[in-house]
Amino acid sequence: MITLQPQFNWRRLQASEAGFAHHVHLQAIADQDYGLVRPDELPHFIAHTSDAGAIIGCFYDKKAVDNTGHGMAEMIAYGVLGMNSATSTHMAQLLNIPDSVRKQFAILDGVACLPDWRGYGLHRESIQARLEYARTAHRTLIGATVSPENIVSLRGLLEAEFVVSTFAMLYGGLVRFILKKNLEAPQLCWSLEKKVDASDRTAHQEALALGLSAYACSQTSGGSWQLHYGYQA
């Protein structure tokens, strides 16, 4: 028996749909360890369906039917793109984005998926959906943050050719890698210098202080994850 892959539709949310994204967020973080994902309140979602940026929602195209008999697509995931928020301004400063190109900068500022829909690659799709939207908005310098323990998100960002460029305490004391990507840059080639265990915060700081950047990751035979640090070749 052949099982068909569900079909998903990504689109920008309207202001009236901010609450739907918040609802997905609350369900997604309910079983997560503290610090793995930043908890966001409803105003964050409202702001990003207006002036602060955009939220790209994922809808499952199998239609449910409401009590009026009309078809309704279920929203199962979302990704936030921050363009004019306080967080995006702070991130631009941390990444040393010059004021002259600040209007080209945006950040991936949150993502979540309903628990029942994990394993379908929606985090990776959310990255691409937001990058595509960023291009249409002429935002070609993209930043992102991720917990060192959030291997799923970290792998997705590295596979999308983001680069870990610094390490900081953010969001009230949460440890985060800070990554960046230039959508207009050619594909980068790297010279591997060292591999660092994902949980070794001191070693990450030391590698970054040497001017190295993390550009990939891999799993050891023992099951732990390592980041690959190197220089652009």
Image (cartoon, rainbow, N blue to C red):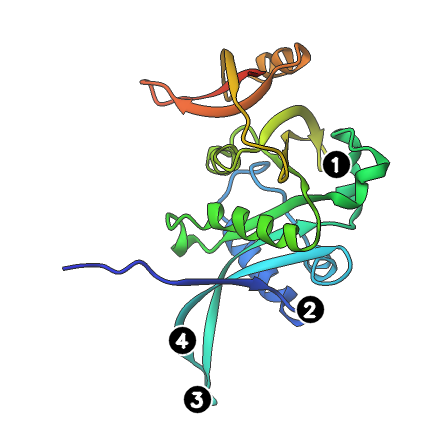
Determine the secondary structure under disc 2.
helix
Mark-to-mark CA distance, 2 and 1: 25 Å
Residue that badge 1 annotates: 91
Mark-to-mark CA distance, 1 and 3: 46 Å
Q: Residues within 10 Å of mark 4 (few under 14, many from 20)?
A: few
Vertical order, 36 against 1 (above or below): above
Residue that badge 4 annotates: 63
- Picture quadrant where residue 170 is located: top right
| Image quarter in which the N terminus is found | bottom left
Vertical order, 206 against 160 (above or below): above
Determine the secondary structure under disc 1.
helix
Q: Amino acid at mark 3?
A: Gly
Work out whether mark 3 precedes mark 2 in sequence or the reverse, and give the earlier one: 2
Q: Amino acid at mark 4?
A: Lys
Determine the secondary structure under disc 4.
strand
Residue extending farthest to the front is 186
Residue that badge 2 annotates: 15
